[in-house]
Amino acid sequence: MNEFEDLEKDLRNLSPKTPTVHFSSRIEEALGDSGGMAFRRVSEEQAPKSQSSKLLPFALTLGAGLGIAAIWVMLSSFNLDSPAPAEEFAEQPALKPIYPSDEEQSPVHGVTLRELEILSGMPVDGWMDPQTSERFLQRVDEGVVERPDGVPVRRVRYDFMDDTLWLHPESDLRIRSSTPRQEFHFIELELY
């Protein structure tokens, strides 16, 4: 044998001396509640675990798995239907393919003006040219800003509402569309 192997064998045989009860109680008192908890846990870890406590989680998992498998087999056996009768698969008349028609006046691709009129419930022909108007809402001075070239300017924002009105005199229909709009104006400042 090698002397290293002898040394390893001797080290394996060594074990620390168990502390005295008096020493353990003094440490437990000094540490307080956390010491009591630590000593209880150390003693639980040192206690040999029984074989039944190791088998309990395995047995529970195995039992749950077998129970689920049994339920699945029972449900699948009830849900099996007999094959469908041959009449259900009888030949059906071929459906006429629908191809979108392109009509130049239609605003919606693939929909004719007649279909659009039926679907929307509004007439397609007879609309007057749209009337547009612009309403000024507010002017906001956003202060002095610096342009990319480094020149300071005063930035002013103008808010508008653009209104478009479509009229159909025959059916007395009106459609109004309002769109907000902003414009920015830069006023150059004079350098002194």
Image (tube, grey):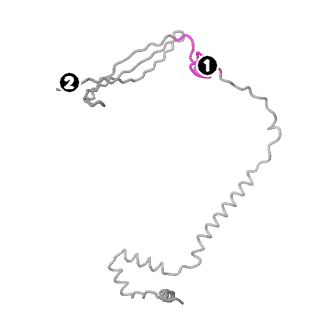
Residue located 59% across and 72% down the image: 56
Quadrant of the snapshot with the N terminus = bottom right
Q: Is residue 118 magenta?
A: yes
Give the foreground label among 2 and 1.
2
Amino acid type assigned to the residue bearing label 2 in the image: Glu
Whether residue 155 is situated above or below residue 175 in the rendered picture: below
Residue located 34% across and 76% down the image: 32
Give how far across and how far down residue 90 sits, in percent.
82, 35
> Based on the displayed image, in which of its 4 quarters is residue 108 positioned?
top right
Amino acid type assigned to the residue bearing label 1 in the image: Ile
Residue located 40% across and 15% down the image: 133
Q: Give the range drawn in magenta.
A: 101-127
Residue 190: image tag: 2
**Residue 2 shown left or right of residue 160 in the figure:** right
> Based on the displayed image, in which of its 4 quarters is residue 117 positioned?
top right
Residue located 72% across and 54% down the image: 76
